[in-house]
Amino acid sequence: MAGTQVLTDAKRRLLEELKRAGPAPARALAQQLGLTDTAVRQHLAALAGAGLVTSSPVRAEGRGRPAAEWSLTDAARELFPDRHAQLSLELIEAIRAANGEAGLRHVIDARAQAQVIAYQRVVPGTPAPLRRRVDALARQRTREGYMAEVRREGPGSILLVEHHCPVCEAARSCTGLCRTEWRTFQQVLGEDVVVERTEHLLSGDERCVYRVRAVHPTAVIA
């Protein structure tokens, strides 16, 4: 990962302290780690240059300039172990072992319906223009980690492109997750459109792409 080459033992301890304690000024970090203020500030400057920490001013008590409070960036948080993918795989296998494939399908279908309800809260329904609906869905999917974007394909047709799949490992183990995806989009976007998957990450493509096509040629797209 970019920036990890700067991680000496002292800098790793600094990141771990910020992870434990949350945002903190340099002086407090120095006291906690038993280092000098100068050494901690030098380490923080190096970590900031690597994109691993960031600072924001906090109001100082009495007179004097505001102190800087340091916190981890998203890039730094990725340095810490995350077992979400492994946990998902373990849960899938546990459900499959306890309830069989039919039970697993029931759980996946329930999850898909919960997604529909959640998406319907942020995606406008018919008769909103199709592009507005797909844009709203793409924004929500991006918030969930799918790096989604919308492309105009042609008259009456829009592409929803997802450049990343944050549940890829789980989907490899349980193909039903992908099976319900396009049906979820279909329900959310409305009966006046047809949704089809044209590219699929797990089929060897570089991304997942969904074509959203208006049923009626005269439908409002933009």
Image: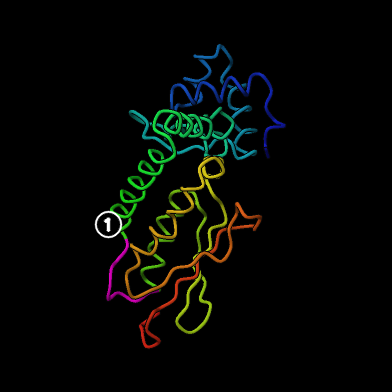
Residue to which mark 1 is pinned: 121
| Residue at image location 29% in from the left, 59% down from the top | 120
Q: Position of residue 12 (x, y in %)?
A: 61, 23
Q: Which residues are magenta?
A: 123-130
| Residue at image location 50% in from the left, 52% down from the top | 146
161 sits left or right of 102 in the view:
right
Type of secondary structure dominating the magenta stretch: loop
Whether 105 is drawn above or below 52: the answer is below
Tell me which amino acid carries mark 1: Arg
Residue 124 belongs to the span the image colors magenta: yes
Q: Position of residue 27 (x, y in %)?
A: 49, 21
Residue 70 visible in this rendered orientation of the protein: no
| Residue at image location 36% in from the left, 50% down from the top | 112
Pointer 1: residues within 10 angstroms few (<14), some, or many (20+)?
few
How many tags in the picture? 1
User: Which part of the image, by quadrant, shows the N terminus?
Assistant: top right
Q: Position of residue 214 (x, y in %)?
A: 40, 78
| Residue at image location 32% in from the left, 69% down from the top | 190
Q: Nearer the viewer, residue 100 or 168?
A: 100
Q: Position of residue 136 (x, y in %)?
A: 38, 63
180 sits left or right of 200 in the view:
left
Q: Nearer the viewer, residue 59 or 84?
A: 84
User: Which part of the image, by quadrant, shows the C terminus?
Assistant: bottom left
Residue positioned most to the right: 5
